[in-house]
Image (cartoon, rainbow, N blue to C red):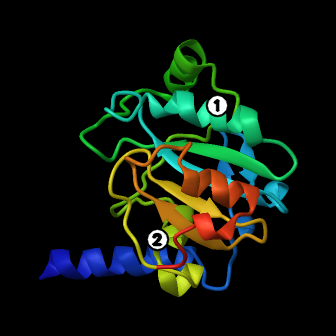
Amino acid sequence: MKSILIFIFMVMSTLLTAQPGKSFYDYTVKSIDGTAFPLSQLKGKKVLVVNTASKCGYTPQYAKLEELFLSYGGETFTIIGFPANNFFKQEPGTNEEIQRFCQVNYGITFPMMSKISVKGKDIEPLYVWLTTKALNGVMDTTVKWNFQKFMINADGTLCDVAPPAESPLSERIVGWIMGRSEEVSGKR
């Protein structure tokens, strides 16, 4: 019973940290080099948020993410990667090791953030917002695995979530970037 109460307290504390009424752009995270990265600097851009890992079956998606970024990144679109070690410890490295891995193996040029937790009691407040309808106003969801993709509209609202297995180059994601709303499955 005591452990249940402690768990409830921790969840409530996390929810209070990720305040309702906030948009995506109200959060500040840390870049992979440890500097503050206010998401407000991305205002006006669509953002694809991806939790990443270097030792996962989906790790080759880094190449497709980079291709997507090179094709569409700029004034109206960007990608940000969040390394996370939540699934079978598939991201064991330090920020420096992750950054080197991304550069050497995939030539990543899109912004990578510091390693975080995307679920559990130590979940990053941004991910609480991404996964909680009471906070994001759109949907409740869970992070199912590495390389899950959250689509954030240019106004800082959550639009949709693409599952880990979906290619970053899918018609749905590219259609969303290009403004072809029929490509997006819609709010769930």
Considering only vertical position in the picture, is 178 above or below 92? below
Distance from Cα at disc 1 to Cα at disc 2:
27 Å
Residue pictured at 58% horizontal, 36% vertical: 65
Q: Single out the residue that lies furthest toward the top.
A: 104
* Residue 176 position within the rendered picture, expressed as x and y whole percent measured from the top left: 66, 60
Q: Is residue 163 above or below residue 14?
A: above
Q: Is the Cβ of the residue at disc 1 closer than 8 Å to that at disc 2?
A: no
Q: Amino acid at mark 1?
A: Glu
Give the residue number, with chain letter if any, for mark 1: 67
SS assignment at label 2: helix
The N terminus lies in quadrant: bottom left
Residue that appears at 41% across and 81% down: 12
Residue 10 position (above or below residue 32): below
Q: Amino acid at mark 2?
A: Thr
Given residues 109 and 125, the one toward you in this image is 109
Residue at 40% in and 72% down? 141
Residue 16 position in % (x across, y down): 52, 80
